[in-house]
Image (tube, helix red, strand yellow):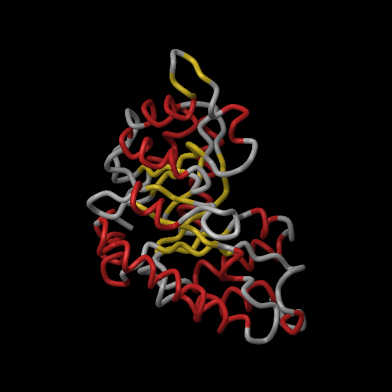
Amino acid sequence: MTRQQLFNQIQLKKSYLCIGLDTDINKIPKHLLGEEDPVFEFNKQIIDATKEYCVAYKPNIAFYESLGAVGWESLQKTIEYIPKDIFTIADAKRGDIGNTSKLYARAFFETMNFDSITVAPYMGEDSITPFLEFKNKWVILLAHTSNKGSKDFQLFHQNEKPLYQEVIEKSQQWASADELMFVVGATRADKIGEIRNLASDNFFLVPGVGAQGGDLREVSKLGMNNQCGLLVNSSRGVIYASDKENFAEKARNESQKLQQQMSEYLEMYL
């Protein structure tokens, strides 16, 4: 998917909502466990209920690969079921030496046909560039994440700059804003504006809104650019809004609430 196609969807749906398909077999409603593929059935109903309100889906790969071969099958069926005009993110956090990264890229971009993949930058340029060789595919680079341990390395200062700033500045030499996004956690809203100044044109994937305490209005106000530039992720707050038979209806309600807020913020800040 191109940048313009993604922005078109944001304008059409008045939304920059990304829904995380972090589907845990131990958390899905019990009545689904009798299905041939409970994980896919859960995802299918979530997608049917929420696709009107979101512009991206983000399966966290760990939830699928932990189940072995059947998990990978559920993931493949999920990706094939997602409408083609909705952006897909493999939340895989890969990143290895060049030959290995090339195979990871082929796995997620060619075999599974994701639009994008999250990548860890620690091993440097030659671990990132193999993912950039695929047309209309995206690298979403971990920059300033929302987890507690992010301070251990990301805020480490060298030459008067924290490491995450070095990552953002250096990586923009490798790729344009048409193929490179950054993960920027919502739990430190004060950093969003600072990072927007460093990467004015790039899209940000923003986790941490909702269950983790991030403020959607602050993220939108400080992080939006002239093509929105934000994909704000909600996982648990949408997909686990209910553990009963009405789970899909509740997920629809939660995603609609987020879309309505986003519609207001697009009007205010875009």
The image quadrant of residue 17 is bottom left
The image quadrant of residue 177 is top left
Left or right? Give the position of 228 relative to 87. left
Frontmost residue, 104 versus 234 = 234
Q: Position of residue 74 (x, y in %)?
A: 63, 68
Query: In percent of the image, x 50 and y 39: which residue is there?
Result: 142
Left or right? Give the position of 175 relative to 105. left
Q: Quadrant of the N terminus?
A: bottom left
Query: In percent of the image, x 61 and y 43: which residue is there?
Result: 147
Q: Is residue 17 above or below residue 121?
A: below
Q: Is residue 2 above or below residue 238?
A: above
Frontmost residue, 132 versus 13 = 13
Q: Position of residue 211 (x, y in %)?
A: 60, 59
Query: In percent of the image, x 49 and y 70: which residue is there?
Result: 80
Q: Position of residue 103 (x, y in %)?
A: 53, 42
Q: Residue furthest top?
A: 159
The image quadrant of residue 269 is bottom left
Query: In percent of the image, x 48 and y 76: which residue is there?
Result: 50
Q: How many marks?
A: 0
Frontmost residue, 43 versus 135 = 43
Q: Position of residue 222 (x, y in %)?
A: 35, 47
